[in-house]
Image: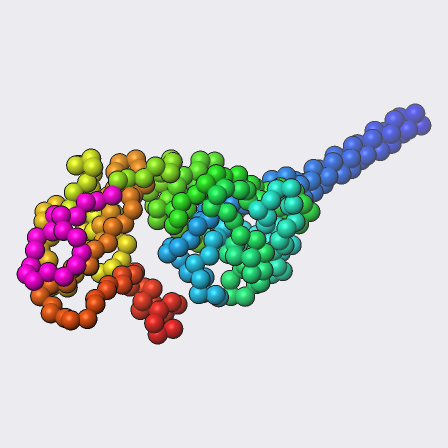
Amino acid sequence: MELKKVVKFAKTRILKMTRKKTFTLFLIIFTFCLSGFGQYQLYINEFLASNSTTNVDSDFSAFSDWIEIYNAEDFDVDLSGYFLTDDLTNPEKWQIPQGVQIPPKSYLVFWADKEDIADSCLHTNFKISAGGEEIGLYSKTGGLIDSKTFGGQATDVSCGRKPDGNSGWLYFSQPTPGTANTTTGYPSLTFSSTPEFSHQGGMYGSPLQLTLSSTPSNAPIYYTTDGSRPGENSLQYSSPIPINDITVIRARVFETGKLPGNIITHSFIINSSVELPVFSIVTNPGFLWGEEMGIYV
């Protein structure tokens, strides 16, 4: 009878020890997952290394380079103490300030302008080179979360993942800082041709019919008359454009599978008699009348 009690006691102790060890092992694995590789689903989702007219930094009223981080988790992620760098051999180049969070399925833009402040926006202590370099996002313990090494970039053309957080990278002629990468993406920095104008901009004594053409001849041409940049939602050229008054035409070719070509701009001044020299300044209306950047700011 005493032997049976001893055996039962031994079995109970072994079972308790096994459960305890299993629980301890679970805690170790869980802690490792939270503190090590793959801590959160955070991605360098898009960047622009040469910003000329895309979007303006409200803190400095300047067109600066930027990096966008995407949080693919279903919960807020606190980035306090994390690091961004443009040199993977120097992971702790710029530390993200305290209190910076990304909501679930959301985006956060960092200005890579070397200003190194956290005002209404976030500004790193480095710039990214349009000639090509690297970007890295590191945890507060120095673990690599995501990185991107890239070659030469084009002005106002961003590079990003599509869909967001995906492994594939594309080029965007319509960057989407702070939002999903839903605009048309292109596999390489291959550009469409430039449109040909039948008349050069200038002063004319009578109305004219403006013809636009492209190579190849079937490539769509989109144009605007308000100074804005032509896009695929702009007017598509199909027949000669009547120029009867002062008119600004900005046109761009969109070949299939290629980035849109250079924007060609011509100003036409009709039936205006002046003795002084005349010049035309054309810009996006938002840059002239906008609340963040314009003549009244």
Q: In the image shown, does 227 or 3 lie closer to the viewer?
A: 227
Vertical relation: 143 (above or below) 123: above
Colouring scheme applied when the structure was drawn: rainbow
The residue at the point 39 percent across, 55 percent down is 52
Task: Depth check: give the residue in front, 267 or 236.
Answer: 267
User: Is residue 227 visible to the viewer in this orientation of the structure?
Assistant: yes
Q: Residue at x 37, y 44 (%)?
A: 172
Q: Is residue 190 above or below residue 74?
A: above
- Please report the residue visible at 25 percent of the width from the left and 43 percent of the height from the top: 194
Residue 181 in view (yes/no) = no
Q: Position of residue 51 (x, y in %)?
A: 42, 53
> Residue 152 at x, y = what percent?
45, 41
Magenta segment includes 209: yes
On the picture, is 158 further left or further right than 126? left
* Image quarter hosting the C terminus: bottom left
The N terminus appears in which quarter of the rendering? Answer: top right
Q: Tell me where residue 27 sits by quadrant.
A: top right
Looking at the picture, how far across and down is residue 29, in whole percent?
A: 69, 37
What range of the chain is rendered magenta?
A: 194-211
Seen from the viewer's position, the closer of residues 71 and 60 is 60
Q: Give the number of marks.
A: 0
> Magenta segment: does it hold 254?
no
